[in-house]
Image (tube, coloured by chain):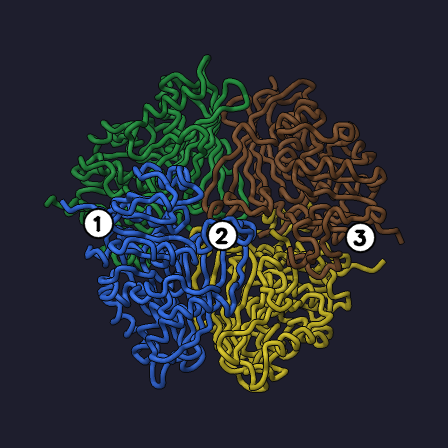
Chain colours: A yellow, B blue, C green, D brown
Amino acid sequence: MSTMIKVAILGASGYTGAELVRLLSRHPRVEMTVLTADRRAGRTMGSVFPHLSGLGLPDLVAMETVDYSAVDFVFCALPHGTTQEVVAGLPGSIRVADLSADFRFHDPETYAAWYGHAHMAPDLQKEVVYGLSELARPEIRKARVVACPGCYPTSAQLPLVPLIKSGLIEADGIIIDSKSGVSGAGRAAKEGSLFCEVTEGIHAYGIASHRHAPEIEQGLSLAAGKPVLVNFTPHLMPMNRGILSTIYVRMSEGVAVADLRRTLEGHYAGEPFVRVTPEGVVPQTRHVKGSNFALIGVFADRLPGRAIICSVIDNLVKGASGQAVQNFNLMMGLPETTALEQQPLFP
Amino acid sequence: MSTMIKVAILGASGYTGAELVRLLSRHPRVEMTVLTADRRAGRTMGSVFPHLSGLGLPDLVAMETVDYSAVDFVFCALPHGTTQEVVAGLPGSIRVADLSADFRFHDPETYAAWYGHAHMAPDLQKEVVYGLSELARPEIRKARVVACPGCYPTSAQLPLVPLIKSGLIEADGIIIDSKSGVSGAGRAAKEGSLFCEVTEGIHAYGIASHRHAPEIEQGLSLAAGKPVLVNFTPHLMPMNRGILSTIYVRMSEGVAVADLRRTLEGHYAGEPFVRVTPEGVVPQTRHVKGSNFALIGVFADRLPGRAIICSVIDNLVKGASGQAVQNFNLMMGLPETTALEQQPLFP
Amino acid sequence: MSTMIKVAILGASGYTGAELVRLLSRHPRVEMTVLTADRRAGRTMGSVFPHLSGLGLPDLVAMETVDYSAVDFVFCALPHGTTQEVVAGLPGSIRVADLSADFRFHDPETYAAWYGHAHMAPDLQKEVVYGLSELARPEIRKARVVACPGCYPTSAQLPLVPLIKSGLIEADGIIIDSKSGVSGAGRAAKEGSLFCEVTEGIHAYGIASHRHAPEIEQGLSLAAGKPVLVNFTPHLMPMNRGILSTIYVRMSEGVAVADLRRTLEGHYAGEPFVRVTPEGVVPQTRHVKGSNFALIGVFADRLPGRAIICSVIDNLVKGASGQAVQNFNLMMGLPETTALEQQPLFP
Amino acid sequence: MSTMIKVAILGASGYTGAELVRLLSRHPRVEMTVLTADRRAGRTMGSVFPHLSGLGLPDLVAMETVDYSAVDFVFCALPHGTTQEVVAGLPGSIRVADLSADFRFHDPETYAAWYGHAHMAPDLQKEVVYGLSELARPEIRKARVVACPGCYPTSAQLPLVPLIKSGLIEADGIIIDSKSGVSGAGRAAKEGSLFCEVTEGIHAYGIASHRHAPEIEQGLSLAAGKPVLVNFTPHLMPMNRGILSTIYVRMSEGVAVADLRRTLEGHYAGEPFVRVTPEGVVPQTRHVKGSNFALIGVFADRLPGRAIICSVIDNLVKGASGQAVQNFNLMMGLPETTALEQQPLFP
């Protein structure tokens, strides 16, 4: 029998932490030995998240009490800003999948410009791999620290990076209109996340100023080989899970929508988690709920030379904890789909 | 005391019909004398819509039994396609506010191309006024038949027509990403409108093929003085009421976002129902729920030279029955806000 | 023309405060001259509640800055516990409708037992009238201070008090299973009120310990002329507004369900806001949403000698602000339905 | 390696059929060889339920075309009333888990009285086992045909049967107030299941006349050893999945709430899917969503001698397809939890 990999989850009392526990509880090679949650230290996971009762988990502990000598791998699900120092302080022998934004930017200056303070671990940043699993598999396998992409950037880059690289679409003037469920805002008690403030309505937020814009631009710029700006407009809507990015692009001269679909189908052929929907089939967020799948649909626009891409994921799975587990599998040389096989939950 | 205006509502058993009843029940000059609903003929309105019990309404009757001699005004809330013949068959002395799409196109050929059959009342079409209240007040006042705009076209044209007319934005390449509540699909029992198929998710539909696209294009083409095509992508999301149109536009050379806001503020100054939100304030659909208000916000884009407009209405009020009542008030020489004064319901 | 009544709303930044503003904005005899909100002092009401923009309201102020010399009537929508001292400190010439629990108990000892501290205005308590409008109209008309009932107690007492008084049901062993929307929890940012914690599920809370239990028992004890205990089990469910109380009662010897319905119909005949549904028609909370209506249905049980009562209200209207306005109308000698005429909003 | 069990699912295009597919797709010993759906025959499962794409499933076929020679086991998820003849017509060598109500009543007369027509397979009925897994394990193991319990009866009998058998509670006068999500109504396009008719509200239905009442009574009568009537009042509320039954019981003389909890804990100790919550912890439907778990909480009532039980399940899993798979595992001698191990999905 194979040995178990001892895993610590830092920040287990948030939604992404809980989602890591949910997924890893089915992982045949993982033993969760450490769960941290500073404000809830001393409590059981089942008292904080009753749906995770009965799993034989260790109690929640404060982060400063963790003994890392019995930890092989760390999932870091801490808030943005606090993560850099934590990860920098871990023993160098421990591999890390970080779910925060703290290590997503190749250029610490970009981080500083958007997050309001200097990067606190610029040296470590140099060795971090940006872990959009399907687009950086070889690098992820070898990385010690992987920065897992944001939820919106995952939904946007999966279709756009291959299309830009192929030269089929113009990298300039891309418009990304995204719609997100509320779990993306986390479990913090904020007025804007209250049921009555969110249900029965929709609104845009962070217009032209959301921190996922530069993350998307970083990926598209690399793909295009030149600096790219995008319009990115997120919306908050009443659902627990799910992101739909409706993306408006201009095709290159002589390119047809069928070319876009064919290229994406080719690029993702054989991928276990990314699917291009058949012509005319519109992806729905509810069709990936609870799963690590991404669905991409490509459609002709009424405006000549333009196309519309619909990209859906579950923000807590492929947009966060699922992709982190996928990266963990890659990093540890395990089958990539381990613990991620379950089908979406519908209705 | 003023005499009462005798009103018939054709198609009272749908959501827009019920909304007409809700609004008109508070109208001091209206007596609802006829309510039709073919499949529910003989029933009380309160048995079909319990929230409308106790209003002293006449029972529902089949359309062919209506005696129009005691009717001064008809609100027609029938399905698309069946309306043309009904309205053409009404006595010429009766004024009409039609909520269907049947008379919205100046050119019967456009209707035929999008609705799949020849227009059945092309002569009558010539005298119909397209009734976006704020943009066609003088014509509406004099019209015998007013075609009330669709819900999406109302949300799109309110901000776009003045901006195009003013030359501040380019009429080409406009992208309209709209999100709608489920009541827009009506009360018909369709699998796609079931709770379980709609809640906890979002999806686009009618991509590049929705029938409200040519209606929007008609209005924008008139404003631009040249043919205009738009991208219009509607989405269905889990809420009862509300439409948000997030609109992506290119500004003309030298124009700034502040110019757009100032122009819209000027255009709608003094309007009772259309408001431009202050700089930085994002309109939410839930802030117009149940009311005839439209809110418009204007925002700078990250892409130079571009702007983002958020336009929200309640699809059943300003997007349907409320605007019909507003037009009724205009046509009958009554104060425009009569029966439309109530504030939105939040939460 | 009649003079305007100058009204202060203390605690205007909560949901019940906002609902008071929504309703009173249509009241022809009310001028809202003072709106308090300590943490939001200095802001406009429209910035705190965008759906209440454009009403020409005064800005929010801190409570200690209010000059009561220009105030005729106070609506007090402050949190439980802080209200007693505030109301006791008001000039004796000002009449008050209080929406908190602070003055609902005739016996200050009951208050102390359930709210954890001694009553702070026991002398004032003696002159306070418990304001379930339909059941205490004469006393409310003359009262200086009216304690408006809680939402659950309103839904429970409306059907139960007449039935107990008439002797048709046993006062012992009544079971009240109530289901409430989330607005009842107020606008405070609490984890338990977050969208993700409330949507897609239901749970009981405050089992056998909710503070509305003694309030219901007070009313039923008075009706029965002896001490009465009830089972009251509230549940939190994903909707903005609405309370359904499903009430299980034993009928007195020889009584039939038709007797219960007939008695309630007789008791509420002519009442503008309370309706008994026809036999077989089940009340739904959505059929009173946004209105001051209460619907009561009575049904036979499978268990011999027992009956089931369904009672629905909008917790923010008849369960709070609407009943407060109704009481205001009674206290000021105005038509009782003023500003409360609007129909429910459905869907 | 073990041979695969060839499974047919009759009625695969409904929600319970889809849920069977979702669960069985993870079952290492199952090969789904036949999926029937008469109106959708010829289509792929992925076109009917996009969340079940990519599973390598056979296309949907009409029921009369099925060749049962290559089928080992049938899951029957057909509508009530049509199932009796279908199951009676299957080869006697095939074992069956039936999800309809058609074989749930030991006495065909009870079926006839509640379903409006004579039982069509009374001989077969004699050998059918009522399959509440935890309560009839030995019989289920040996059965050829198992009638899987209804969703409400599962939630009610799990706590009540052991308590009645133990004599701790009175079998008379039990009140079961149940709240269900909308998926229980199936995927049929009915007005009452439309999003707009269900969201933002709650209502009782089938008061004293729901067909699950006699099913519950059958189980409780057997437990009590005498005929038992119950009050059962179901409510429809806006959530996809979940049933909460709040149950009001009288305890036998001298019994305390702690006795009830201790007895249930003892009865379900070691059960993989049934859990009694710790004292003071209230079960929530969202904490079992997507899983086969049942949670039971026991609470003291304010009324002396009475107790309150909260019982929650996912109606599509433990209340339907999950329990069917659990029974399949029992019948085939497989580990009972196979394919049912996944944790609930929250949020």
| Most foreground residue, B270 or A199 | B270
On the image, numbered disc 3 is attached to which residue?
Answer: D31
| Residue D163 in sight from this viewpoint | no
Do callouts 3 and 1 mark residues in contact (Cβ within 8 Å)? Answer: no
Secondary structure at numbered mark 1 = strand
Q: Which chain is indicated by disc 3?
A: D
User: How many discs appear?
Assistant: 3
* Residue D184 rendering spot, x and y as whole percentages: 59, 42
Q: Residue furthest left?
A: C1
Quick one: quadrant of the N terminus of chain B? top left
Along the line of sight, the residue nearer the viewer: B129 or D319: B129
**In the image, which is nearer the foreground, mark 3 or mark 1?**
3
Q: Residue at x 32, y 65 (%)?
A: B130
Badge 3 and badge 1 in a common chain: no
Task: Tell me the distance, in whole angstroms, between the alpha carbons under discs 2 and 1.
Answer: 32 Å
Label at residue C32: 1
How dense is the environment of label 2, judged by Cα within 10 Å: few (below 14), some, or many (20 and up)?
Answer: many
What amino acid does circle 2 point to? Answer: Phe
Up the image or down, A63 lies above or below B267; here it is: above
- Where residue D95 appears, as percent x and y from the top left, is 81, 40
**Both labels 2 and 3 in a single chain:** no
Residue at label 2?
A: C195
Q: Is C329 or C62 nearer to us in this picture?
A: C329
Within 10 Å of disc 1 (Cα), the crowding (few <14, some 14-19, many 20+) is many
Q: What subunit carries mark 2? A: C
Q: Amino acid at mark 3?
A: Glu
